[in-house]
């Protein structure tokens, strides 16, 4: 490498500044959110809080500790994530296995592949899906959030592609030794595919944690809402306040709501994701690059 | 006899997935007959009266429908273009960064919102652009009048497009960075010997090297021509900005779930599904033909 020229140095400086600015701009909204939740309610509502808490206190979080709705919905979310991820993973695993066989090993393979693939490109849409969920009696039950999406075909294809990378000899050797397909699945494929199970598992956990609209659609009782659905009701409440006619009215309405508490709850809704973010990023980047750049 | 037993087990393993898919994916597809019915929830799919194309005629003649369709395409097309352009610029800039720790920090900050839900991000955006939020604070500081961003149709669209790009740009950026890493290093060495500067190297090596992935990403995104971001808009909009921000999905949701007009709502849904399917088929064929891309 020869010595960088002046123009190159200027470029590198500008580049560093631009990228730093983008990074700071991306982080500021979250710092702002956190600062509001740590400020006094009056300062927050007057719009005095920028990047640093004004009138620092932990009241919002203290009050949050007594907020039944928050903890109840947090509990529902945890339940949903555990139950939903377990079912999703088992289904992805046992569905991908037969489909990863070659056509001579499993002659109905192509039929099944088409059966699943069609659902990736065509769907009934919101209203008919709602009617089916209603007709199967899931309305207002946590199963409405789990069963309709219990088999994620995209994840299944990811798993399937991974299974195909497993040498066929492994399967054949086990079969010759007298192992049935169940045994091959659980004793050979499962241990070998732990990394991709971790990746797909993370996708699934984040998906279940972040999902909120299905709660609005399928659940009637607010006490059954998962956390993100509960948060969405808080946000949609502000939206309907905003349409009041005059600026004065909006300001008056804003004063009625507890801004610091609301922001504290939103922040807590994002916190679990932020805590596992380093893992998420690592696995996602691996998953994306493997999935998209296959030559 | 042995193979028969083996295959029977494989069928058995597929059974739960098949049942779920039959009920919750094929069920709603069959349920699309309601688009041609005067659908009554109590009568169900079998006893509701068939009305032919009436639901379609009814919806397409609604005064708002054309505006909704236009909003959807407008927002979706802007998002598609920016989802290619912004990550491309970011990836090219990041590629010039020599310190890997710095590059890692930037990537992390850019990728973070991808993993957060629209409730969290919607809450953040609404707060940022609220009447006494920081953006209006900034405007006031430089002596401008505050703007009610979330109540203005033009601003609302802009915020919807911008915030979705903010949430999603990290994904394409990672894909593009991976494509850059895959470019043969000897090409750059040869260019250096020939006296090409970094700018020329970017134009003549990096960009052409990324062309297949850019075409692929662009082509695949066309399938979403009628997906303008349902959850995002549902959490961010309010009746004042229906004119600029109401899209097909939110329109269907209100028509079906609030006005209880199930037939017409399903008709719009079917229209959307068919258009999407056509776009996806064309684009997958194109992707397969031009860059040999296959999902299986």
Image: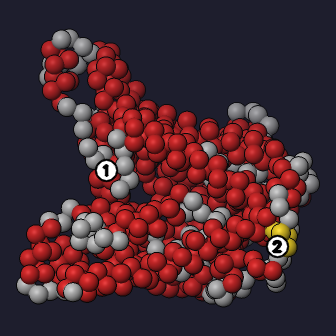
The disc numbered 1 marks a residue on which chain?
A: A
* Residue B69, image x, y percentages: 75, 45
Taking the image as shown, residue B119 lies to the left or right of residue B295, namely right
Which quadrant of the figure has residue B9?
bottom left
Q: Is residue A10 above or below residue B255?
A: above
Taking the image as shown, residue B104 lies to the left or right of residue A67, namely left
Taking the image as shown, residue A168 lies to the left or right of residue A215, namely left
Q: Nearer the viewer, mark 1 or mark 2?
A: 2
* Residue B291, image x, y percentages: 36, 37
Q: Is residue A105 above or below residue B239?
A: below
Secondary structure state at the residue bearing disc 1:
helix
In depth, the one of B113 and B24 nearer the eye is: B24
In depth, the one of B38 and A295 nearer the eye is: B38
* Residue B30, image x, y percentages: 65, 70
Q: Which residue is mark 1?
A: A289
Query: Mark 1–mark 2 contact, CB under 8 Å?
Result: no
Label 2 crowd (10 A; few <14 / some 14-19 / many >=20) = many
Q: Is residue B5 visible?
A: yes
* Residue B6, image x, y percentages: 25, 83
Q: Quadrant of the N terminus of chain A?
A: top left
What residue is at 30 percent from the left and 43 percent from the top? B178
What residue is at 37 percent from the left and 49 percent from the top? B294
Which quadrant of the figure has residue B202?
top left
Secondary structure state at the residue bearing disc 2:
loop
Q: Residue furthest top?
A: B195
Q: Is residue A73 visible?
A: no
Q: Which residue is mark 2?
A: B39
The disc numbered 2 marks a residue on which chain?
A: B
Which quadrant of the figure has residue A124?
bottom right
What residue is at 44 percent from the left and 63 percent from the top? A114
């Amino acid at each position: 490498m020869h010595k960088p020229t002046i123009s190159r140095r200027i470029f590198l400086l500008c580049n560093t500044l631009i990228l730093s600015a983008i990074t700071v701009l991306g982080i500021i909204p979250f710092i702002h959110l956190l600062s509001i939740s740590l400020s006094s309610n009056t300062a927050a509502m007057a719009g005095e809080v920028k990047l640093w808490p004004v009138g620092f206190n932990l009241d919002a979080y203290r009050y949050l500790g007594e907020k039944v709705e928050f903890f109840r919905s947090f509990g529902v979310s945890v339940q949903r994530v555990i139950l939903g991820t377990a079912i999703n993973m088992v289904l992805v695993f046992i569905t991908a296995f037969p489909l990863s066989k070659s056509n001579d090993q499993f002659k109905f393979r192509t039929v099944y592949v088409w059966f699943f693939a069609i659902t990736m490109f065509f769907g009934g849409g919101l209203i008919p899906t709602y009617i089916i969920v209603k007709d199967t009696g899931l309305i207002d039950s946590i199963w409405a959030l789990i069963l309709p999406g219990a088999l994620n075909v995209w994840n299944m294809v990811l798993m399937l592609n991974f299974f195909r990378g497993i040498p066929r000899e492994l399967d054949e050797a086990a079969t010759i030794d007298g192992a049935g397909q169940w045994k091959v699945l659980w004793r050979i494929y499962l241990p070998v595919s732990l990394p991709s199970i971790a990746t797909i598992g993370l996708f699934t956990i984040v998906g279940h944690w972040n999902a909120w609209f299905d709660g609005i659609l399928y659940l009637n009782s607010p006490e059954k809402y998962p956390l993100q659905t509960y948060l969405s009701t808080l946000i949609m409440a502000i939206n309907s306040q905003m349409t009041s006619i005059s600026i004065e009215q909006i300001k008056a309405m804003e004063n009625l709501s507890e801004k610091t508490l609301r922001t504290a709850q939103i922040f807590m809704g994002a916190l679990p994701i932020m805590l596992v973010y380093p893992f998420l990023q690592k696995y996602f980047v691996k998953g994306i690059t493997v999935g998209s750049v296959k030559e | 006899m042995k193979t028969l037993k083996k295959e029977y087990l494989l069928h058995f393993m597929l059974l739960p997935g098949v049942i779920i898919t039959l009920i919750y994916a094929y069920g709603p597809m069959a349920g699309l007959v309601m688009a041609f019915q005067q659908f009554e929830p109590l009568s169900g799919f079998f006893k509701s009266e068939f009305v032919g194309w009436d639901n379609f005629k009814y919806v397409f003649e609604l005064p708002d429908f054309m505006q909704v369709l236009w909003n959807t395409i407008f927002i979706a097309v802007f998002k598609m273009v920016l989802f290619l352009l912004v990550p491309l610029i970011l990836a090219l800039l990041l590629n010039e960064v020599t310190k890997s720790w710095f590059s890692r920090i930037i990537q992390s900050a850019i990728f973070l919102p991808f993993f957060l839900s629209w409730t969290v991000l919607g809450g953040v955006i609404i707060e940022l652009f609220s009447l006494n939020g920081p953006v209006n604070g900034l405007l006031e500081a430089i002596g401008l009048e505050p703007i009610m961003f979330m109540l203005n149709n033009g601003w609302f669209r802009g915020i919807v497009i911008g915030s979705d790009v903010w949430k999603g740009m990290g994904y394409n950026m990672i894909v593009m960075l991976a494509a850059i890493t895959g470019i043969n290093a000897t090409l750059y060495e040869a260019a250096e010997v020939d006296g090409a500067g970094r700018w020329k190297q970017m134009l003549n090596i990096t960009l052409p090297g990324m062309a297949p992935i850019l075409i692929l990403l662009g082509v695949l995104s066309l399938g979403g021509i009628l997906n303008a971001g349902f959850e995002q808009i549902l959490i961010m909009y309010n009746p004042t900005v229906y004119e600029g921000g109401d899209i097909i999905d939110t329109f269907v949701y209100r028509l079906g779930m609030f006005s209880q007009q199930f037939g017409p709502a399903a008709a719009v849904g079917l229209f959307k599904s068919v258009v999407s399917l056509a776009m996806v088929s064309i684009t997958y064929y194109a992707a397969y033909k031009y860059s040999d891309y296959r999902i299986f």
